[in-house]
Each structure stands twice: as structure tokens, then as C-alpha cells.
Amino acid sequence: MDASERIELEIDEFGVPCGGESSLFASFLGTIAKNNTLTPLSIEHWKRREFKPFHQQILKITK
């Protein structure tokens, strides 16, 4: 899949992705979670203030 290519997700009434593209999206999120540059292990909890710049970067990538 090209970096500029976008997929359209179908979501259910709870906002949970469903349909054929949901597994592709889950796999993509897994690669982000394993990326130490985007999700450093030195920050103990994602709600901490130090994680905010990483959070913004992840949102930008997934939009």
C-alpha cells in the first residue's frame, strides 16, 4: 500500500471499525505501536504530558 493511499473505514454504532478494511487498519495500528520512535517505552502511561507530542504525531499519521 502506498503511503499516500487512504482507506475508508466502516464503523459500527459504537465507533468500532468493522468490515473488510478493519483488519488492515488494525495491522497498521500494530506497526505504529511497535515503532519505538512513535511510542517510546520510557513514558510509562500514554496520558502523561510527555506523551502529548507523540500522540499528536500518531493522530497526524492515522488521519
Image (cartoon, helix red, strand yellow):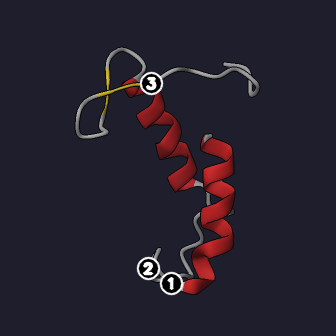
For residue 22, above or below residue 56: above
Crowd rating for badge 3 (residues with CA inside 10 Å; few <14, some 14–19, many 20+): some
Identity, as a three-letter code, of the amino acid under mark 2: His
Name the residue that disc number 1 marks: 48
Quarter of the N terminus within the rendering: top right
Q: Position of residue 55 (x, y in %)?
A: 60, 64
Q: CA distance from mark 3 to mark 2?
A: 28 Å
> Is any part of residue 38 visible from this angle?
no
Q: Position of residue 63 (x, y in %)?
A: 62, 40
* Foreground pick, 36 / 59: 59
Q: Answer yes or no: do the residues labelled 3 and 2 have beta carbons within 8 Å?
A: no
Tell me the residue at 64%/22% (across/down).
6
Name the residue that disc number 2 marks: 45
Q: Quadrant of residue 62?
A: top right
* Foreground pick, 55 / 23: 55
- Residue 61: assigned label: none
Q: Answer yes or no: do the residues labelled 1 and 2 have beta carbons within 8 Å?
A: yes
